[in-house]
Image (tube, rainbow, N blue to C red):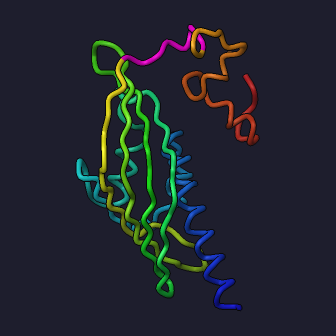
Amino acid sequence: MDHELRAYVDRARIVDCIVRLARGEDRRDADLIRSCWWPDATYDYGVQSGGFDSYLDWVVPGADAIRNTQHVLGQSHVELAGGSARVETHVVSYHRVDMGAGDQDTCVGGRYLDTMEERGGEWRIARRVMLYDWYTEWGDAVDWAKGVMGVPLTAEHYSGRANGDYSEVFFGKRNEA
């Protein structure tokens, strides 16, 4: 049972790391992102690859043209092998992009292939490869001033990160403005 419990805890820590990274990417939070990658880690996203420092420089502060992102994670398949693991996690990522003639909403579906390593009792990414399964453009971005489906919002913070990120207030990371 000890072996099974250890495997269960390791899987939970691995998935927690991947979830924390998605949160950090959506907020362009360098400290949160850094807590998920080993400093000597590498990545390959097809459109860019390299070491962790180049990844962090790419994601934070992020492209000015990408005004908003949201990474929605699906199942993670985890195969443990001692102090390392191979993990496949499904992801759907939304991006609001300034195309020069107005904002467009786009969406990418794919999978992260992560090689995770445990060092000093902590699981982090040692290597990530992004696989792309599909991509779609949803067209012109909605104008939040009009609310949701034509119904006005009662406070600016309901529009997510478009007007700051109220979840940071919720979790006590910043004070309400």
**Residue 143 falls inside the magenta stretch:** yes
Q: Residue 139: horizontal and vertical position, in percent?
A: 35, 20
Instruction: Identify whether 9 is placed above or below 21.
Output: below
Q: Give the range drawn in magenta.
A: 140-147
Asked which quadrant contains residue 168, the reply is top right
Instruction: Identify whether 96 is placed above or below 27.
Output: above
Image quarter hosting the N terminus: bottom right
Identify the residue at horizontal 46%, vertical 30% (top origin): 68
Q: In this view, does 146 lie to the left or right of 109?
A: right
Is residue 67 or residue 173 the one in the foreground? 67
The outermost residue toward the left is: 47
What count of labels does the image hold?
Answer: 0
Q: Is residue 8 left or right of residue 169?
A: left
Instruction: Identify whether 136 is placed above or below 55.
Output: above
**Residue 22 falls inside the magenta stretch:** no
Asked which quadrant contains residue 41, the reply is bottom left
Is residue 99 or residue 57 the one in the foreground? 99
Is residue 40 or residue 110 the one in the foreground? 110
Instruction: Identify whether 81 is placed above or below 105.
Output: below
Q: Residue 43: horizontal and vertical position, in percent?
A: 32, 60
Q: Residue 92: horizontal and vertical position, in percent?
A: 44, 45
Q: Residue 158: horizontal and vertical position, in percent?
A: 66, 23
Identify the residue at horizontal 47%, vertical 16% (top origin): 142
Identify the residue at horizontal 68%, vertical 36% (top origin): 167
Image quarter hosting the C terminus: top right
